[in-house]
Amino acid sequence: MDLSGALAYIVVLIGLIMLITGIIGHCGLYTVIGINTFKKKTD
């Protein structure tokens, strides 16, 4: 499979975004949408 041009840049950009959000454990888009992935403690 040969990716070139704009498609290659898009694939790399998506990959970097996924890598960064995986490392820091937080996605800024979740904040905008209002999704919370952390479970609340019921102590």
Image: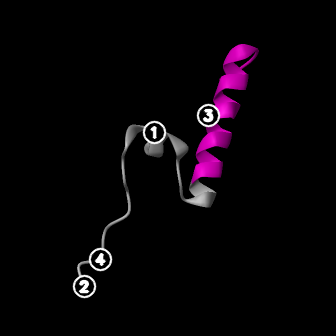
Q: Nearer the viewer, mark 3 or mark 2?
A: 2
Q: Residues within 10 Å of mark 1 (few under 14, many from 20)?
A: few
Q: Is residue 12 above or below residue 43?
A: above
Would you name the residue on which mark 2 appears? 43
Q: Which residue is mark 4?
A: 41
Of the two numbered discs 2 and 1 on the same chain, state the one appearing first in sequence. 1
Q: Quadrant of the C terminus?
A: bottom left
Q: Are marks 3 and 1 in contact (CB under 8 Å)?
A: no
Q: What numbered label is drawn on residue 14?
A: 3
Q: Amino acid at mark 3?
A: Ile
Residue 14 is one of the magenta-drawn residues: yes
Residue 2 visible in this rendered orientation of the protein: no
Disc 2, disc 1: CB below 8 Å? no
Rendered position, 31 above or below 22: above
Identify the coloring: one colour
Q: Residues within 10 Å of mark 3 (few under 14, many from 20)?
A: few
Magenta residues (range): 1-21
Q: Which residue is mark 1?
A: 32
Is there a contact, CB below 8 Å, between mark 2 and mark 4?
Answer: yes
The picture places residue 21, in percent across and down from the top left corner, at 59, 50
